[in-house]
Image (cartoon, rainbow, N blue to C red):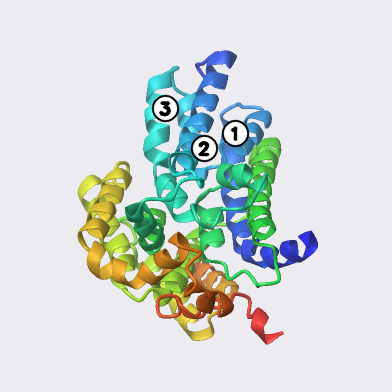
Amino acid sequence: MSPMTIPQQIITIAICALGTMLTRFLPFIVFSSKKPTPRYIQYLGKALPCAVFGMLVVYCLKNVSLLTGTHGIPEAIAIAATAGLHLWKKQMLLSIAGGTAVYMLLVQMVF
Amino acid sequence: MKIKALKAAFPYTIPIFAGFWFLSLAYGILMNVNGFSFVYPMMMSILIFGGSLEFIAVTMLMSPFAPAAALTITLLVQARHLFYGISMLEKYKNTGWKKPYLIFGMCDESFSINYTAEIPPDVDRGWFMFFVTILNHFYWVSGATIGGLIGSLISFNTEGLDFVMTAMFVTIFLNQWMKEEKKYTGLIGIGATAACLMVFGPDSFMIPSMLAILALLTAFKNPIGKCYESDFDRESDESDPADHISENNPGYETAECEPETIQTQGRKNK
């Protein structure tokens, strides 16, 4: 059981919710649509997303250890399958389903 | 109008449905196993709507009360949303009353879909992004609630299903990467984050990664920025008569940087 009292639990959950909202709303509050957005921020708005998607791919893999366990081999094979399918057929759902199926087969049956 | 937007938005959310149900069921089950009522995962999913933080919050709730630490952890884990906000400043413009909800529900997945989706010209953008966000939110909350209700009753071999999220981000990354004229923005994202992961470890690499990405994008602002310059001119002086040419040919001016998006679902074939 939780060592906190109910009010303490509610405060903790409220902090998580409000902190999250702060990170989501802050750019929209600072750069309101009434004033023109600074050029540097406009530039970041265009240049960031591709870098951020790359960051998210690595973020998903953060708990993969290259030195222990399966050495990230199933992940590497499944990502290659996902990317290969995607470059070949260019159908997002097919690439995601195929890559995930490959990964599940690998971790359940091979490794 | 709404039905059309819902029909356009739904296919984009199918992989998220699979991934969210798997993750949020696991999260609900974890809360249940730790002795919490289903009301907890349900309310936390509605109010926080951020998977990684909700898992961390389980640990917080099972530890002694520490509000300052909870706030610090929240801001560190969620800081990446600042990047999403900066990227969505333009896209969320003119969405009226939906805008606060779009920002409230801007999780990794909603941001990724709303930023990259090729929204058909006859579909209302605001409603499309609204449905993407609310469908994702619904998947997450329903999974967490069901997980909290039935707890450990479920047992089937889903090992590896969580890879669906990784696969989704790989395809989204590829779509965006192939659109970029300067391929190294994507490489900066992968390289800087991977390097920081190796140096700082899985628990504290995100803030250094974000700072490294900002530093590199700022250092290479001139070569990268050239590709987007035509966009800025169009956005900043809309009264310029020369711009009517581009208004009549939507997408023409930016074609160099953002050629035809790759269609999902093969909807083009229908």
Q: Which label sits in the foreground, 2 or 3?
A: 3
Q: Residues within 10 Å of mark 2 (few under 14, many from 20)?
A: many
**Looking at the picture, how far across and down is residue B216, in whole percent?**
23, 58
Q: Secondary structure at mark 2?
A: helix
Identify the residue position indicated by label 3 in the image: B71
Q: Secondary structure at mark 3?
A: helix
Q: Amino acid at mark 2?
A: Glu
Callout 3: chain? B
Dividing the picture into quadrants, the one containing residue A97 is bottom right
Identify the residue position indicated by label 1 in the image: B44
Identify the residue position indicated by label 2 in the image: B54
Q: Amino acid at mark 1?
A: Met
**Looking at the picture, how far across and down is residue B200, in whole percent?**
23, 45
**Looking at the picture, how far across and down is residue B91, in whole percent?**
54, 57
**Left or right of B182 in this view: A28:** right
Q: Residue at x 61, y 38 (%)?
A: B45
Q: Is residue B129 above or below residue A92?
A: above
Mark yes or no: residue B240 visible.
yes
Q: Is residue A104 above or below residue B270?
A: above
Q: Residue at x 41, y 50 (%)?
A: A37
